Every structure is written in structure tokens, then in C-alpha cells.
Amino acid sequence: MSKANQKGGQVISSAIRITGYSSILFVLLILFFLLREGLPALASTPLKSLFSVRWYPIEGYFGILPLILGSLLVTIAATLIALPFGIGSAVFLSEVAPPWLCDILKPIIEILAGIPSVVLGFIGILVFAPFIRRFLDIPTGLTAFTGAVLLGLISIPTIVSVAEDALNTVPNSYRQAALALGATEWQTIWNVTLPAAKSGVLTAVMLGIGRSMGETMAVMMVTGNAPVLPLQLNSLFRPVRTMTATIASEMGEVAAGSQHYEVLFFIGIVLFLLSLVINISASLVSTRSRGRAERLLS
Amino acid sequence: MRRFLILSIFVTVLLISGCNGQNTPSTETTPPASVEYIENKGSDTIVNLALAWAERYQTVKPEVRISVTGGGSGTGITALINGTVDIANASRQIKSEEQEAAKAAGYNPQEFVIARDAIAIIVHPSNPVDHLTLEQLSKIYKGEITNWSELGGEDREIVCLSRETNSGTHVYFLEAVVRMGSGEDKSIFTANALLLPSSEGIIAEVKDNPNAIGYDSLGYITDDVKLVAVSSLETPDMFILPSLETVNNNSYLISRNLYMYTLDVPTGAVKDYMDWILSAEAQQIVSELGFIPNIN
Amino acid sequence: MSSTVMGKAKTLQRIGFSLLGLITTLTVIPIIGLVLYIVVKGAPAISWEFLSAMPTNGMREGGILPAIIGTLYLTLGTAVFAVPLGVLAGIYLAEYAKESLLTRLIRIAIINLAGIPSVVYGLFGLGLFVLFLKMGTSILAASLTLSIMTLPTIISTTEEALRSVPNSFRVVSTSLGASKWQTVRRITLPQALPGIVTGVILGVERAAGETAPILFTGATFFLPQLPHSPLDATMALPYHIFIISTQIPGMPVQIQYGTVVVLLVFVLGMNLIATLIRNRARKNRQW
């Protein structure tokens, strides 16, 4: 009995070990399949054409530059919108608000994290885009800006929760020391707590960027999807087409193995690599700072 | 409490695997043994029509189950080539290379003209512009005319709305309007044209936006947008509005056939269904949905 | 003199705090507004028939049963694959893994899995499950795709929950002669269970609301009957919302909002349950 038990324990222990490695396996699998389906695009489409400025796949124009820049524009704008609200709310929740208020506010912000992006897109297309057109008096409400506002909303919960965690890990002794030196709480926040949590806050921002860059449905529904090169001053208030929306709206149409199919997978590779860079640097920033904090405290 | 949680998780897992393992979920009555399935996929233009047919056909032949999916004409034909559907819907004709690909895969797609459709040009009801020549339309969509004042309207920027490139409507519009039917013309849409994922998106934006111009299948046009009369290249002074009559007498220019492609020469349930689609009963549904019945 | 400096600083602080409060209010109000707006617009559409009937008249009438059932199947399918894998992997990281290069690689891999855009998961699912493994667009392919997407959430929350169990528990158990697995199963896992369940629900909840990964792996526009096997394509609430808000002419607004309400209740309901479990566990915690 106990022997069988032991044996079962061993089986389970090795199963646990194997599943432990599964994440690596899945990342490699994802990379492998993206490369397998997407790399042939480099052979079938000359680089010059791939990085040209016109995207019109049904006539063989495969320039992905407008799509990359479109994604960048929307992401940057979304981050700029989300930053003050995200960081401000995080500071308020962690440093200013009394606990009972936190207990009310935090779940509400978590609700936002739970709202599916297709729901935000739905409200965007029905309510928000028409409002933007009238309010800003622009030709159409389906613009990069409309998408950026929705994306900002989507990335706020990520920014708030990660930044708040970072602020909470700043040792209370820092704050007490500053207050004892006669600083007001406000001065303490600005000059002591926030700088101490700097890298955690930076991580929060980067994860927020990653979240907005990868968002698909909301963006596809409200940005108008015109593959223009967004290089003009007013591009933010013009329609734009992102990489994610392009994949989502065109993948269904293409025959497996066709040039268009390969190029869409190639865009997938670009997205994968971008998210890789963002996430690895975000985690580097936070581990480096954790190392420093541990040194400081010891 | 904790034990209960573990237990409930296990039970759920078991339940699902049990559910999925069997072929009939418990929520449904077991279908008769002779039940037949037809997979139908393709054009978004046709999807609502196909849906209405599939629904009505349930009352005609309850033992036949038809599943309908949209996604665009290209999607449907691709699925046909891959052999994953029985009937593909397309708002354009199958291309020769698609025909080849299907043959290479061992299929022999058969074409059926199941209805006709006019592509209506629409603007906001407050827009004073009510007629355009084909050439003007082409220039608008090529980005050469960008302000309504050039067309006798107000001084407003034109917002061009188009369907996504995977729709047969887009391809048809490119060939018939942007290139004005000329095979040599290789011009394409302006990059500024908004590519909306669907017909409904175009109607919704035109309904709301006085700057917008869009094109859409006549079947989708609602009362809160304004139709624009269009003239042909040959008779640039005669502006015609799309209607049942003007499409049937070929005076309205921008009209086309709608197709269904079967995997092979249809037999059995698929044949019965195709026959029914061309019957008076089914063609009545065509006109109810605002398309033009195929009465040849 | 020093008192005026102090006074100025105090005023500045008051302004600063009000500003922060204002920013937070401006963040929270749209959320409440959004949810209330949707509920007010959609609630009148909700009826037993709406929830339990098949759609009719080109989905403009009748109910949304197939979409609800489809989302249930996808959610449960995701849980079937993701929960065992994710929980075991979390146990590995918390209880078995030593700090090594391999462990660091695993952590980097998890961070990356969490950051990969959902539409890229869709591409992957299409490439691996639908085409390569020939599952076709099916509940199975979509569930597998979604489950890989939810893995990082489940792994990290499981690990976190296990790590929050004080080490003394393990020490006592091992000193009484229990093996590693016995310690995990009898001691740490039960203690960490509420945290794990919370993580599982949050992960699966995200899967339930996603559209992009199922676009090319399992979602379909319309089915006249419920799916019969895991190899059937299915309707799903998020994709259904996308369709009825963009693809169908003359769709009654009420049905659109009603469908959104159903998805919101589904997703936020899971969220609420997760929060309740977490809070309850925090209160009952014995250490």
C-alpha cells in the first residue's frame, strides 16, 4: 500500500517536473509555427516590397510599413493617455486613499480588466466614435485616436495593478524617514516613494504598452482600418490600420500557403518579436531593481 | 469547503469530458438516424440570405441540417478547395486559379447563379449630392477627388468607405467602378479609404456621418441613408437609381450575379437543396431580403 | 517664516491629493458609466426566451442559446486543458524548482506567453491545431488555443498562492517523514487552494471573453443547431457580439446590448466569484 503510494508519488512528481517545462515548450512551439508559416514570405516577397508603403494584398501590394507605424501610433497614443490615469490612480490607491476607499475602488478597476475588448469595441463603434466625430469636428470618428482611447482604457488596469504593487513594496521605513525629516506626505510621495518604486512603475508602463499593442478586436472595430502611412501631423485624428486588425480581418480569407497567408504570418512574427522585446525588458527592469533593493536592505 | 472545491472541479472536468466525448449533448433531442449535414460558407453579402434559406429549409426538410458561416467570398472558396464545405457562397465568380486548385485537390466545383445584386452608392441624407458619374466615383475611390465641393456639395472632406479586401463586393467594386470595367487599368483604392469589416459598418457610418460615401449591396440599404443615382460611361447624362427594375433591364450599371459553388455535381441532400434554392419559394425570400431574384 | 513654507507645502499637498483623487475618479467613473449604460440598454432584452431559444429571422429575433452554449463549451474546454497543466506547472515552480538557468528560462517563457498578443495565439492555433493537426475549425482547436493563452495566469497565481504558505508548514511536514509530494498534497496545496481557484477562474474568464484567438480556430457565424462534437465549430458570445454589431443589417439594438449584457454577466460573474473566494480565504487564513 505505502509502496504503491510512493510509486504514485514518484509518477506525479515527474509529471510535475515535465509540466514545469511546458511553458518553454509552448513558447518554442509558437515561435516554430510562426516561423514555419511566416518565413517563406521572405522568399516569396522581396524585402523591398515587404517594407514598402502600400498595403493592398489582393493586388500583390504587401508593404507592411503602414501597418507597423499604425500599430506604433495607436500604442504610443494609448500609453500617453493611460499613463497619467494609471500612475495617478496607483499613487492615490497606495499612498493617499484610506483602506475603505481602496476596497471600493480596486474592484471597480478590476472590473475594467475583466471587460472583453469586443465589448469596448462595440461601445466604441456605437457610441464613442460618433461622439468623437462631432466633438472634435473631424471627417470621421473612426480614427487612431478613438482606438487609442479604448486601448488606454484597456491598459489602465494593468498599469494600476503593477504600479501599485511596486509602490507597496517600497519599505515603510523610507516614508517614515522622510516624514521625520519634516517632509509633507506629498513631498514624500514625489521625492522618496515614487523614485524608489521607479523601476516597478516602469515595468507597469511597459506591460501596459504590450497590452495595447497586442489588442485586436476593439482596435479593428473603431480605427477605420485604412492602411495609410501615419506620418502627418493630423494622423492621430485619421483612420489607421494596425497589424493586429490586419491579421484578424484578412486571415479568414486567404488560402493556406498562399503568399498573402505567409505575409500575414510574417506580421505575426513581427508582433511576437515586439512583445518578446517589451516583456523581456520589462522583466529585466524589475529583476534588476529587485536585486538592488535587496542589496540596500541587507 | 476546500474539499468541496476540489470535488466540484473534478466533477466539472468529468462532466465536460463526458459531454464532449459523446456525440450528442444532453440538451438536445437525438436527431433521426438519417440526418444529413450541409456545410455552407462564404460571402458576407450572401450570408444573411443563406441564413434565411437555411432557416426556412428546416421547415421544408427538417432532417437536413445546414450550418452557415460568413467570412467573405474568398473564405468560402478557399474552404471549398480544402474540401471542408459542401457549398461555398461567393459574390464574385470563382477565379481560374481557384478552379485549378480545386481540380488539383480532386473536386469539380459547380456554379449556380442564385440571385442578382445591385451595389448601391450611398451618402448621408443631408448630403445635397444625389447623382454621380462612374468616372467621378472612380476618382473618389482613387483619391483624386477628395472634397464634396468638387462634386457640387458642401465644402467637406470626403470620407470613402469600403468593404474589406476579402469581400467579393470589394473586388467587384474595384473592377467595375474604380477601374471602370477596363481590364488593363491597374489602379487601386486610395490608401485613405476606410476598410470596414462589414456591410453593417458601412451603413452605420454613412447614416451618422455627413462626410461619408459608401457602397453596399442593395439588400443591405436601409431608409436612413440616401441612394445616389449613377450614370454609365456610354450615357453620362442618364443617372439611374438601383431598383429591381433597373437591374433586370440592365440599365443600372453596378450589378452582378451572386453565386453558390458546390463541391461537385450535386447529389442527394445538396442537390435537393440547390433545386429548392432556385424554386419560386426560395427566390421569394431573395426579394424579401432586398436582393433581385434570379428569374431566368 | 518657516510656518509659511510649511503652509505652502501643506497647500501644495492638498492640491496634489485632490488632483490624484480627481484622476482616480476620472478613471473609475467611465467604468461605472460604461457598465451601467450597457446594463440599462440591454437588460430589457433579457428574458428566459432570449437565453434559451435558437436565433430566428437571420438572428434578428429569438434567443442566443447557441452562443451561450458555445462559450460554455469553450470555457470548460479551456479549463480541461489549462487547469491540470497550469496548476502542476505552478506546483513545480513553487515547490520543486531550484534557482537555476532552466528555472529562469521557464520564468522568461511564462512572461512571454503572458505578453503574446491574442491574435498571434489565433495564428498559432490555426497553424498547429487547425491545419497541421487537422482538427479543422473546431471547439477542440479553439479550446486548446485558449488554454495555452490562459496558462501563464494559472501558473503564476498557483505559484504565488503556494509561496504564500509559510515555509514552517513544509518543514514540519518533512520532519515528520512526509515525502515532497505528500507534503504538497496534504499540506501546501490545500492551504493554497483558494488562491489557485481564484487564479484559475481569472484565467479562464479571460478566455471566455476573447474573440481574436477563436476567429480562425473555432468560431462560426451561425449554426442552426448546437454543436454535436468537439470537432464541430461553434458560435460564441464574443464573436457573436462582433457579428451582430457589424455584420447584420437592421439588427435590433436591444438584442445587441442584451447579448453584451449576457457576456458581461458571465465574465464579471466569474470575476466576482474569484474575488469572493480570495477575500474569504484572506479572512480565514490561520497564519
Image (cartoon, rainbow, N blue to C red):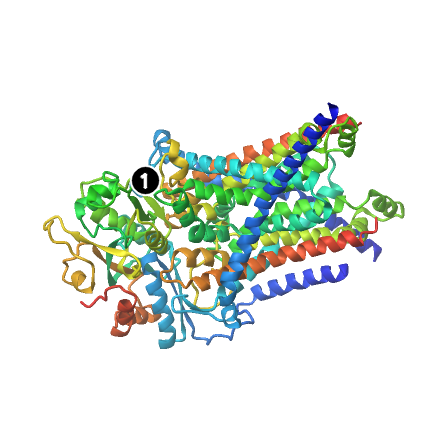
Regarding residue A15, the answer to whether it shows in the image is no
Foreground pick, C279 / B97 = C279
Q: Residue B39, how many percent across, how many down?
A: 39, 63
In the picture, measured across the screen, residue A250 lies left or right of residue A201, that is left
Q: Residue A69, how many percent across, how many down?
A: 42, 34
Identify the residue at horizontal 28%, vertical 74% (top origin). Answer: B281
SS of the residue under disc 1 = loop
C40 shown above or below C116: below
Q: Which quarter of the rendering shows the C terminus of chain B?
A: bottom left
A217 shown above or below A166: below
Identify the residue at horizontal 50%, vertical 72% (top origin). Answer: C49
Q: Dot 1: within a 10 Å radius of its alpha carbon, few (fewer than 14), some, or many (20 or more) residues?
A: many
Furthest residue toward top: C1
B210 shown above or below A39: below
Regarding residue B2, the answer to whether it shows in the image is yes
In the picture, measured across the screen, residue A297 lies left or right of residue C88, that is right
Q: Residue C52, how many percent across, how many down?
A: 52, 70
Q: Quadrant of residue A43?
A: top left
B54 shown above or below A263: below
Q: Chain of mark 1?
A: B
Q: Quadrant of residue B227?
A: bottom left
Where is mark 1, residue-wise?
B192
In the picture, measured across the screen, residue B180 lies left or right of residue A116, that is left
Label 1 sits on what residue type? Asn
